[in-house]
Image: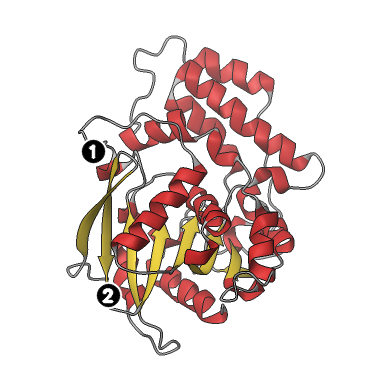
Amino acid sequence: MATSNLKTTTVTTENCVLHVTYTGSGSKLLVLVPGGTGLGSSFHASLPGLASSSDNSTAQYTVATFDRRGHGASNLTSSGAKITSFFSPAQAARDVAAIIAHLGFQRASVFGTSQGGVIALNFGVYFPDKLEKLVAHESPTFGLLPDLEGGRWVDHITRTYAVYKASGAGPAMKLFARMIRGWDSTSKDVPSEGEVLEPLRPATDDDVKELSKAGDDAAEPSPGASVDQLFWLEYEFLTAIAVPNLWDLRRHLHGDRYEHLSSDSLACVVGKASRDAPYATTTYPQAEITGSQHHIWPAGHLIYVFDPDAFVLALRDTLDRLK
């Protein structure tokens, strides 16, 4: 998709200069919140398609995305210093609100994927008056998973962080990958439902010991790691698993205080290829707790990167089904 018509602007808020990319001239605003990479460029190929009407939808949006605080071009304070603060979901939601106001809108529809989905859900909690529609795609609220499953994946995150601190990004990401299923699948290569898959296995204390030892003799602790990946691991990885107050969000959606919202204002979304990945199975309790819609999309966790055309169609369809 052509990206020649993309515009840029900056928003200075809470001692951070946020870099925003947007396009379209629709009367409604759609804000896309990136996940762990923190980079709005992951959505750039999709912005024109989301801003235009289509055969199946007459809705036209002004569509915006941004580099999240601490990532990409949004890595500096207003005085030019590097941002080194730990991730706060509430502050991230305030960043989205600041972007909406800067672009001249009272309300916006908000899409967030992965960690960006956690931010989107928090936006719904803290800014229901500014919310039109909300789509949370595979947001890792592991604490909502039933029985001991949630605890195992929370432990997986803390153990991955321990390996990162001991041995750097390489061994940590090797361990992190144990929770991944269908990460880079497109809408054309989703595995069949009947396929038997090896169960995903959370990290153990022995894994931490083994991978920490592997890094003892490394001359460079994080070879090949990007600046944004290192920022994510250092300042966001642990705090991103905090569960938003979905019970408050439910009250916003089902109560009488915000008449523009309803149970049909929120969709929790999972990709077919993600199957039993913990960031996928969390979407079911999210929808149950909030009493909202649950949608299944084609492809996997990074649909917007590996299959942007399918992403545009899926997101527009979900937005059209919301009210």
Residue 35 seen from this side: no
Number of numbered discs on residues: 2
Find the residue positioned furthest to the top: 217
| Image quadrant assignment for residue 96 | bottom left
Q: Earlier in the sequence, mark 1 or mark 2?
A: 2
Q: How is the image coloured?
A: secondary structure
Q: Amino acid at mark 1?
A: Ser
Q: Amino acid at mark 2?
A: Gly
Residue pointed to by mark 1: 78
Disc 2 secondary structure class = loop
Above-or-below relation of 22 to 50: above
Left or right relative to 207: residue 74: left
Question: Which mark, residue 156?
Answer: none
Residue at left offset 69%, top offset 63%: 251
Residue pointed to by mark 2: 24
Spatial CA distance of label 1 from label 2 is 28 Å
Q: Nearer the viewer, residue 226 or 213?
A: 226
Give x and y (percent) for residue 284.
70, 60
Give x and y (percent) for residue 168.
44, 22
Which quadrant would the N terminus be assigned to in this image? Answer: bottom left
Mark 1, Cα crowd under 10 Å, few <14 / some 14-19 / many 20+, is some
Above-or-below relation of 162 to 66: above
Disc 1 secondary structure class = loop
Above-or-below relation of 251 to 153: below
Residue at left offset 36%, top offset 42%: 69
Residue at left offset 39%, top offset 18%: 221
| Image quadrant assignment for residue 8 | bottom left
